Structure formats: structure tokens, C-alpha cells
Image (tube, helix red, strand yellow):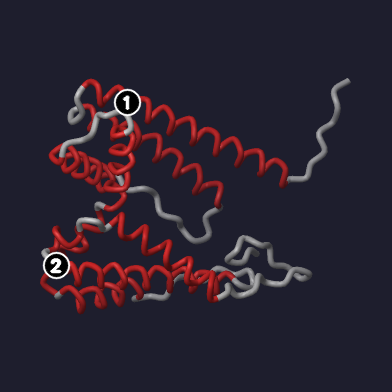
Amino acid sequence: GIDGAGVPVGPTTMPAPEPSEAFRKMMRSQVRAQNKRMYSDIGTRLGLTADDASKLIDLLTDQQVDGMNAARHRMRGGEITPIPNGLRQKQLAEVADLIGHDKIELFKDYQETLPARQEVSLISRQLEGVDLSLSDSQQQRLVAALAEERKRLPAPEYIPGTSREHHFEAMKAWQDDYAERSATRVRGILNPEQLASYNEYQEWSREMRSQLETRRALRAAEGTNLTVPLAD
């Protein structure tokens, strides 16, 4: 098995030690910083005060850190157990108690668009680097379009008992298909100059995925520990 730090756990390998308090603080700080970026306009979208928006980010951060710690403990000893039933409902109830039950559906809708928002954020930074910034209208249209494509054909979820290789191949096929579908939607929103830069970004993304797949294949080949016969 493998523990939370990625260290194999076996008869002669001890589980990794618990992280220090300093490490825990650093991890929470990093998670909160990421959440501040991801939920940067959550206050405006949900009609929250600045104080309540900050408290919501703190709550989401605590929930995520708790989840990371729980996952680490579930993997200690080499076994992966299912996430407890009802955890998602419990977390949503905590959010509803903070922001108001009348806003929970708005929150759930916002969360569904997070992957698309992250993607648009990457595109935006790419275009800003060449002085081709997105307008507010373009950003909103891109988020809506990409969120719609992700919802129409969601990424495959991991099914317990399925091999990692099978899941990896399914995810790769989905990513290739999504890249084509999203590119089609983006073409109708960007202007020609922005589109040219976006196409370069897409090419870079494909190269990065290809390099990751190559490294993964090499690691898998090395893991077989086979001896390749020399040619005559």
C-alpha cells in the first residue's frame, strides 16, 4: 500500500510520521490562498458581506484540510476506505448555517462552475501576458460555456475496484474530447488575436499532457523490473 506521503507501506516499511504543526499551518495557509483565488467573487455572486465571504473561505479551507487529513489516515496501513456517507451533506449544512439556507442553491451552482472558472483564469493570464486581456463579458461567457460542456459530458469518476490504468485511459479520452469541444465554444467568444494566442496555449497544454503521459509510461515500464534482451 501507499501512505499519505506517497511512501510504500509494507512489512518492512513504517508509515510516514504525522506532519508537524508547522507543516499543518503551512498547508492550511496554502489551501486558503488557493481558495481566495478560486472564490474571489463569491461575495458578489451570493450577496455576502466581505466579512461573511471571508468566513466562508475559512470554513471551506477547514473542510478541505480535514478531508486531506482524513484521506491520509484512511490510507495509512495500505488500505483505502470509502469516504464516510453523508459527509458532503454535512459540509453543505455547515455552509448553509453560515451564509443562510436561502443561498445554498446559489453556492452549489457556483461550485459547479469552479473547474470552468479555473480554466478561464488560466486563459485570462495567458492573454494578459500578451496584452490581449479578456473583457468581463468574455470571461462570463467563457465560464458559462465551459461549465456547460463539463456538465453535458462530465469527467469519468473513479469506480472502486477499477484498475488505475483503466481509469487513466478513460480520463485521457475524456480530456481529449473535452479539449475539442471547449475549443469549439471558445472560438465564438474570442477575437482573432486572442484566438491565436489561445491556440498556442492549447498546443502547450497538449505538449504538457504528452510529456506527463510519457513520464508515466516510463515509470510503469521501470516498475515491471524486466530485463530487455540485447539485440544480436
SS category of the residue bearing label 2: loop
Residue depicted at 37% across the width and 72% down the height: 63
- As drawn, the label of residue 219 is none
SS category of the residue bearing label 1: helix
Look at the image and tell me in which quarter the N terminus lies.
Answer: bottom right
**Location of residue 106 in the rendering, given as x and y in whole percent from the top left corner:** 15, 62
Q: Amino acid at mark 2?
A: Leu
User: Taking 136 as reference, is 196 left or right?
Assistant: right
First in sequence: mark 1 or mark 2?
2
Q: Are marks 1 and 2 in contact (CB under 8 Å)?
A: no
Residue depicted at 19% across the width and 72% down the height: 52
Q: Amino acid at mark 1?
A: Ser
User: Taking 180 as reference, is 69 left or right?
Assistant: right
Look at the image and tell me in which quarter the C terminus lies.
Answer: top right
Task: Name the image quarter holding residue 2.
Answer: bottom right
Residue depicted at 72% across the width and 72% down the height: 14
- As drawn, the label of residue 197 is 1
Q: Residue furthest right?
A: 232
Residue picked out by circle 2: 48
**Location of residue 154 in the rendering, given as x and y in whole percent from the top left corner:** 32, 48
Q: Give the CA separation, mark 1 to mark 2.
A: 36 Å
**Location of residue 16 in the rendering, given as x and y in whole percent from the top left corner:** 65, 70
Q: Which one is nearer the viewer's eye here, 87 or 17?
A: 17
